[in-house]
Image (spheres, rainbow, N blue to C red):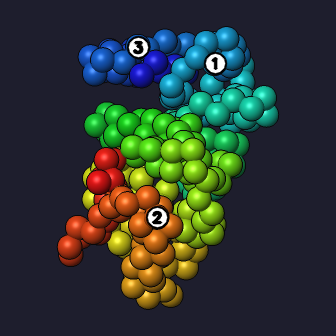
Amino acid sequence: MRILVVEDEEGLADSLRRGLSIEGHWVDVTHDGHRGLDLARIRDYDALVLDVMLPGLNGYEVCRRLRNTGDTTPILMLTAKDGEHDEAEGLDSGADDYLAKPFSFVVLLARLRALSRRAQQVQSTTLQAGDLVVDTVARRCRRAETEIELTARELAVLACVMAGDGDTVAKLHILHDVWDSPLDMDPNIVEVYISSLRKKVDVPFGRRAIRTVRGLGYRIAPDGG
């Protein structure tokens, strides 16, 4: 990842630069809010590590200005404050995550990896397994050139399974991902939707793309044969 670190404590900033570089990341560092905002605007970063207490512009304001211009770069805010009101202000300003000092470098790395995965999932609007394609933004599904009519819930269940990229997706994961109140739902509702999907995206095309992994969940077989 290409990461911008905006941190006015030079010792900490240098430690982050060295540590992140050792992990294979490309790192730019600045110690001023105005300069951080300028760099974030003119260069493409995969993530920002942004301190709150900065000279010039504080981290909250840097974050707000980036979000107000439509910048969606993942932002991890660092601060010596650990009160819940400070955390809320950071998140309300548009930050994606919040880490109070002192923090573990291992935890910071894990948070950055999580932000990167989330960003990739958001950017990936088209899911494909063989000739089965789901566009999660346009809410459309097709098998090769044939459009398949699905309900919104069916599309969401199918997208959740396809997002596993061939790995098994647990029934409970689907339930929590698709339904607003999963604790109030019978988990067997997932089986009902999987059965309905098979009748629409597999059976008419002589395919078996949606596979049951007994006792675990479901997965997509790209060949569908």
Point out which mark residue 26 bears.
3
Horizontally, residue 131 falls left or right of residue 145, namely left
The answer to whether residue 105 is above or below residue 167 is above
Q: Residue at x 20, y 73 (%)?
A: 214
User: What kind of residue is marked 3?
Assistant: Trp
Q: Could you tell me if the residues under marks 1 and 3 are in contact, i.e. CB atoms within 8 Å?
A: no
Residue 13 position within the rendered picture, expressed as x and y whole percent measured from the top left:
44, 19
Quadrant housing the N terminus: top left
Is residue 171 visible to the viewer in this orientation of the structure? yes
Q: Residue at x 42, y 62 (%)?
A: 202
- Residue beneath disc 1: 40
Q: Residue at x 59, y 30 (%)?
A: 73
Tell me the distance, in whole angstroms, between the alpha carbons under discs 1 and 2: 50 Å
Element under disc 2: helix
The answer to whether residue 202 is above or below residue 55 is below
Point out which mark residue 204 bears.
2
Residue 115 position within the rendered picture, expressed as x and y whole percent measured from the top left:
47, 40
Residue 59 position within the rendered picture, expressed as x and y whole percent measured from the top left:
64, 31
User: What kind of residue is marked 2?
Assistant: Pro
Q: Earlier in the sequence, mark 1 or mark 2?
A: 1
Tell me the distance, in whole angstroms, between the alpha carbons under discs 1 and 3: 14 Å
- Give the total number of marks visible in the rendering: 3
Horizontally, residue 162 falls left or right of residue 21, namely right
Element under disc 1: helix
